[in-house]
Amino acid sequence: MSLDLTETDTLVVGAGQAGVAMSEHLGKLGIPHLVLERHRIAERWRSERWDSLVANGPAWHDRFPGMEFPGYGPDDFVTKEDVADYFVAYAKMINAPIRTGVEVKRVVRQQGQPGFLVETSEGSIRAQRVVAATGPFQRPLIPVIAPQDAGLTQIHSAQYHNPEQLPEGAVLVVGSGSSGVQIADELQRAGRQVYLSVGAHDRPPRSYRGRDFVWWLGVLGAWDAAATEPGKEHVTIAVSGARGGHTVDFRALGHQGITLVGVTQGFENGVARFAPDLADNIARGDDNLRQMLDAADAYIARHGLDLPEEPEARRRLADPACVTHPLLSLDLAQAGVRTILWATGFTVDYGWLQVDALDANGKPRHQRGVSSEPGVYFLGLPWLSRRGSTFIWGVWHDAKYIADHIAIQRKYSAYRAASEQGSAVKATAKEITA
Ligand SMILES: Cc1cc2nc3c(=O)[nH]c(=O)nc-3n(C[C@H](O)[C@H](O)[C@H](O)COP(=O)(O)OP(=O)(O)OC[C@H]3O[C@@H](n4cnc5c(N)ncnc54)[C@H](O)[C@@H]3O)c2cc1C
């Protein structure tokens, strides 16, 4: 199989939600394009998420404007397989020109002419523009402190599917964002002894006074925040749509039987060391929750909304023993820990994109997705334009902006001064008379 095209105007790399959204907007503006996906549409939702995952936001919110989730009520949380099916159906609905099973290996600038040469697993293609829609979470990140211990199974959250996949025994889960807390909870409910290493986190209420937190972030303008607050760059957000959706409460996880520990600092001779910061991290998560409740109350008062009071949202459980007497070290063998599960996030990998759009650390250089290399765009990255940029609905709006930018640039390219047009007409007339 080879690519049946030798050139296209805009090449979109990746057919996750970002690539599909990009195709929709390019299509609407009549911009010829092609989307290349190395696996299947929305592959990461299918194979790089655990089996029981549901969307963190409810069905009315975590979707594109053009289609609802079939078979779901607005407040339901969609399973990850149905999220993937949604994007397949969406791509079909908009007739997106997607070629699956084609990997983009290298993109380089063409010399002495505009555009790029794109080498793929199925041959080369030239494109005037390239949109990198290869995802915010491309390469699982395992910190360098990971122990070199052949007796331990170590996997990243992107490789975790279900409890049965792990060897018998206790599990140390490192990372307390949405992935870490949900996986730790699932493992504990499956009968595992679980240690959960808790770092800095935000933990919004799942819902408050009858409205889901996604609604609150929307009306309070938080999804539109252009950048994370200084000092909060490494703060993860702990939310869960599991079991119908609930507020993540670390104290409740402690009472349930999970042993909470502070930030994992290192490993030596089979012993894990934890920072003495557990209570602080939990207290700062509480502050974040309280701030959101206060902001929501103020919004309700300011707009005179009739939403039911919910004082219990401010109630705090007693600290479990693991918080009052935190473990600062753990002998893994003695504790029966056979697995370390790293829920420590991801990084990007643009090795294939060999143009002037990346900084010395390989990070994209861009403004709202428009890169420093004319004709190269990034989509789907964290904080691309706002907090919502990696989310399903957010990427759709970012794609619209980029498509618009491409349309404007195409107009500039097509422009010819009247004098040039005149000379073109004269040239044609000369050719005819010759
Ligand atoms: C555990 C988890 C839960 C999440 N839950 C939610 C949620 O509930 N709601 C929400 O809005 N967001 C959620 N997100 C965030 C976000 O929606 C997803 O990460 C989503 O997968 C991002 O979509 P994307 O299209 O930007 O990137 P990806 O889904 O990563 O898609 C990129 C595509 O590019 C392809 N690709 C990569 N390199 C190449 C190449 N060289 N050539 C060709 N193809 C290539 C990949 O195969 C992939 O299919 C979640 C993220 C995670 C990690």
Image (spheres, helix red, strand yellow):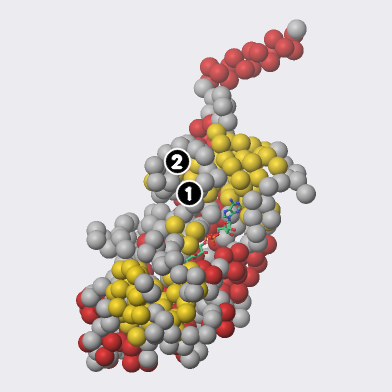
Image location of residue 347, percent across then percent down: 44, 57
From the viewer's side, name the closer residue of 234 and 193: 193
Residue 378 seen in this snapshot: yes
Which residue appears at 68% of the width and 56% of the height?
100
Residue 421 location, x and y as percent?
Answer: 58, 20
**Going by the picture, which residue comes out furthest to the top?**
434
Q: Residue furthest front?
A: 269
Q: Position of residue 108 (x, y in %)?
A: 56, 36
Specify the quadrant of the image occupied by residue 346: bottom left
Query: In this rendering, is residue 374 above or below 292?
Result: above
Name the residue located 35 percent from the left edge and 75 percent from the top edge: 271
Instruction: Write the residue at 48% across / 62% down.
Output: 140
Q: Is mark 2 within 8 Å of ligand 1?
A: no
Look at mark 2 in the image and give the residue it sits on.
Answer: 357
Q: Which quadrant would residue 32 be assigned to in this image?
A: top right
Residue under label 1, please give it. Answer: 378
Judge from the rendering whether residue 376 lies leftward or rightward of residue 198; answer left or right: right
Residue type at mark 2? Ala
Mark 2 and 1 residues: CB-CB less than 8 Å, in contact? yes
- Furthest residue to the right? 1
Circle 1 residues within 10 Å: few <14, some 14–19, many ≥20: many
Q: Tell me the quadrant of the picture where the C terminus can be found.
A: top right
